[in-house]
């Protein structure tokens, strides 16, 4: 099985990236990561990132371990070049090509290693077959009994408790209403008394 990872349109020339890729492509994955961490070139960081992307694809998508993988190939292809120019003497211009590249890392599994996705598919197929066989063994009277609705048998004690709770809640609501009415009456009485006192003061003046 081959796992791929690719980074496109990288602003580095393919010739400089191939110098690093050729050193690493025949190593194991762990040795390649250690070697890329030591190489003092800008392109080593690019190759390391793409290699880590391929490892992440293998572990997350297919459930493979790093020990079960090995590098199949590291391909560096030329990408589109950005064309610029520089003014020189006698009204001329020299061309500048800012080259890009595409880096692809292919990993392959070692022999006698199956990804987790294929194992899960086989397990699901087997479980579905077992379920179908069990459904065929179910007899007709059992199926008819399963269709009949079951009667809900609640104990009498729970009904009595629920009725008592309802009564208490109604009494509490009545008490709250009576208290609120009494408070409103007091407030209105105090307001009327204050109005009378103010009117008497104005009349005395």
Image: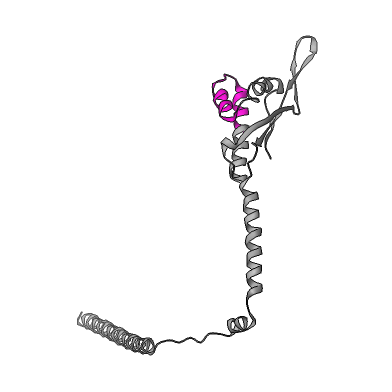
Q: In the rendering, at what x and y percent does residue 67 appear?
A: 57, 35
Q: Does residue 103 sit above or below 64 in this rendering?
A: above
Seen at 75% across and 15% down, the residue is 87
- Answer left or right for 139 relative to 202: right
Kindly give the residue lying farthest to the left in the view shown.
204
Seen at 69% across and 22% down, the residue is 18
Seen at 65% across and 54% down, the residue is 122
Quadrant containing the N terminus is: top right
Q: Which image quadrant for residue 181?
A: bottom left
Q: Does residue 203 sit above or below 22 in this rendering?
A: below
Seen at 53% across and 85% down, the residue is 150
Q: Main secondary structure of the magenta part?
A: helix
Q: Which image quadrant for residue 183?
A: bottom left
Q: In the rendering, at what x and y percent does residue 37 appear?
A: 54, 24
Quadrant containing the C terminus is: bottom left
Q: Nearer the viewer, residue 117 or 156?
A: 117
**Magenta-tinted stretch:** 28-49
Q: Which image quadrant for residue 199?
A: bottom left
- Answer left or right for 144 relative to 87: left
- Answer left or right for 107 relative to 38: right
Q: Nearer the viewer, residue 86 or 105?
A: 105
Q: In the rendering, at what x and y percent does residue 96 appear?
A: 74, 19
């Amino acid at each position: 099985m081959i796992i791929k990872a690719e980074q496109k349109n990288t602003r580095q020339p393919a010739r400089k990236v191939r110098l690093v890729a050729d050193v690493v492509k025949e190593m194991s994955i762990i040795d390649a990561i250690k070697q890329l961490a030591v190489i003092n070139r800008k392109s080593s960081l690019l190759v390391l990132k793409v290699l880590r992307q391929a490892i992440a694809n293998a572990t997350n998508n297919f459930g493979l371990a790093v020990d079960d993988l090995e590098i199949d190939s590291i391909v560096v292809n030329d990408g589109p070049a950005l064309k610029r120019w520089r003014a020189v003497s006698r009204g001329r211009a020299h061309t500048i090509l800012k080259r890009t590249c595409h880096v692809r890392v292919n990993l392959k599994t070692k022999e006698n290693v199956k990804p987790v996705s294929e194992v899960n598919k086989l397990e699901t197929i087997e479980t579905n077959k077992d379920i179908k066989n069990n459904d065929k063994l179910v007899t007709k009277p059992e199926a008819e009994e399963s269709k009949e609705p079951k009667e809900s048998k609640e104990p009498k004690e729970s009904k009595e408790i629920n009725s008592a709770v309802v009564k208490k809640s109604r009494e509490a609501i009545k008490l709250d209403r009576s208290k609120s009415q009494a408070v409103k009456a007091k407030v209105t009485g105090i307001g009327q008394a204050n109005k009378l006192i103010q009117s008497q003061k104005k009349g005395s003046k």
